[in-house]
Image: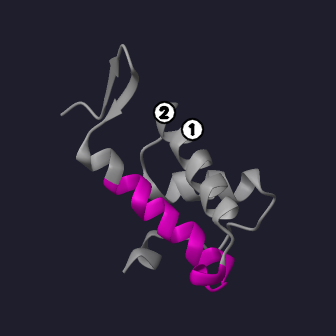
């Protein structure tokens, strides 16, 4: 199954890719150890934007996506593992 398809409107991601991005967002959120309900909307948008950019570049593994975003922000990703998704 193809996870990325180019279209005239940009990139189209299948449900599996979207699920991977959602899991990556959850991992980043857990790594930040803050109350997501009190997180400013702009922070949520920046996290989502960076996840989407990495996914569009071809990275669709949730832990790798999350680690890339955390590194982008200069944050420690050493304790981030797939088991955090449970």
Q: Is residue 82 left or right of residue 79?
A: left
Q: Is residue 41 above or below residue 20?
A: below
Instruction: Read off the residue under disc 1.
Output: 53
Q: Which residues are magenta?
A: 19-38
User: Which residue is farthest top?
Assistant: 8
Q: Position of residue 62 (x, y in %)?
A: 45, 56
Q: Position of residue 67 (x, y in %)?
A: 61, 58
- Say the numbered circle drawn on residue 56: 2
Q: Residues within 10 Å of mark 2 (few under 14, many from 20)?
A: some
Q: Which residue lies at the image location 81% right of the left edge and 58% below the top edge?
A: 74
- Snapshot quadrant of residue 19: bottom left
- Say the numbered circle drawn on residue 86: none
Q: Which residue lies at the image location 77% right of the left edge and 56% below the top edge?
A: 73
Q: Position of residue 57 (x, y in %)?
A: 52, 31
Q: Which residue lies at the image location 42% right of the left edge and 44% below the top edge?
A: 60
Comparing 63 with 33, the one in front is 33
Q: Is residue 25 above or below residue 5?
A: below
Q: Is residue 33 magenta?
A: yes
Comparing 27 with 80, the one in front is 27
Does the residue at mark 1 contact the one at mark 2 (Cβ under 8 Å)? yes
Q: Position of residue 38 (x, y in %)?
A: 65, 82
Q: Residues within 10 Å of mark 1 (few under 14, many from 20)?
A: few
Name the quarter where the N terminus is drawn: top left
Q: Is residue 53 above or below residue 25?
A: above
Q: Is residue 9 left or right of residue 76?
A: left
């Amino acid at each position: 199954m193809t996870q990325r398809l180019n279209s005239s409107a940009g990139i189209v991601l299948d449900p599996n890719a979207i699920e991977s991005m959602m899991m990556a967002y959850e991992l980043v959120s857990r790594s930040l150890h803050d109350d997501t309900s009190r997180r400013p909307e702009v922070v949520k948008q920046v996290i989502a934007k960076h996840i989407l950019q990495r996914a569009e570049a071809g990275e669709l593994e949730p832990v790798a996506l999350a680690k890339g975003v955390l590194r982008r922000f200069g944050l420690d990703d050493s304790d981030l593992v797939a088991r955090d998704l449970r």
